[in-house]
Image: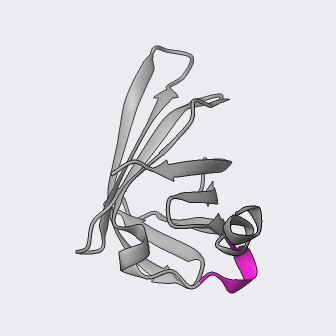
Amino acid sequence: MLLLSLSSCKKETDIYLSIEDLVGTWKTDYFDKSPFYGPMAITFRDDYTLTIHYKKTLDDGPMSNVYVLSMFDIDGNKINYYGSDGNTSTLLIKSFSWNTMKFRMSDHEINLTLEAEKIE
């Protein structure tokens, strides 16, 4: 059983994602990477749109909910998403199995490595 689950987890160099792999909602555990806080939820839809939800403190003020609504494309193990504000960001998938993934999220203000579980 252990051998089977190890072989079912794809590593970064051999990940070629499809829309079918991603569709659904993925959620991380709680994290505290000030000013960003989790859990984070990412919902991928089959029309190549996504929603990302997390919490953020703004200028040492109260914590706010952040929702990113975006179009995305898939390039192997990279998910590039395009915000309505013109910013492009990337999720780099480091490992992937049918219900878990480890990814690095980076853009002009965020740089996190997180693990998510598919919940829907």
Q: Nearer the viewer, residue 23 or 91?
A: 23
Q: Position of residue 117 (x, y in %)?
A: 51, 50
| Residue 79, position as x, y percentages in the image | 50, 72
Q: According to the image, what is the colour scheme of the structure?
A: one colour
- As drawn, the residue found furthest toward the left would be 47
- Quadrant housing the N terminus: bottom right
Residue drawn at (74%, 67%) of the image: 6
Position of 50 with respect to 47 (left or right) is right
Farthest front residue? 1
Q: Please state the extent of the stretch shown in magenta in the rendering.
A: 10-15
Residue sitting nearer the eye, 115 or 65:
115
How many numbered discs sit on the rendered protein?
A: 0
> Taking 113 as reference, is 58 left or right?
left
Q: Is residue 6 left or right of residue 65?
A: right
Q: Position of residue 45 (x, y in %)?
A: 27, 66
Q: Is residue 77 magenta?
A: no
Residue in front for this viewpoint, 47 or 108? 47
Compared with 38, 43 (above or below) is below
Q: Nearer the viewer, residue 69 or 95?
A: 95
The percent position of residue 42, horizontal first and vertical second, equals: 41, 52
Residue 46 occupies which quadrant of the picture? Answer: bottom left
Q: Residue at x 57, y 17 (%)?
A: 60
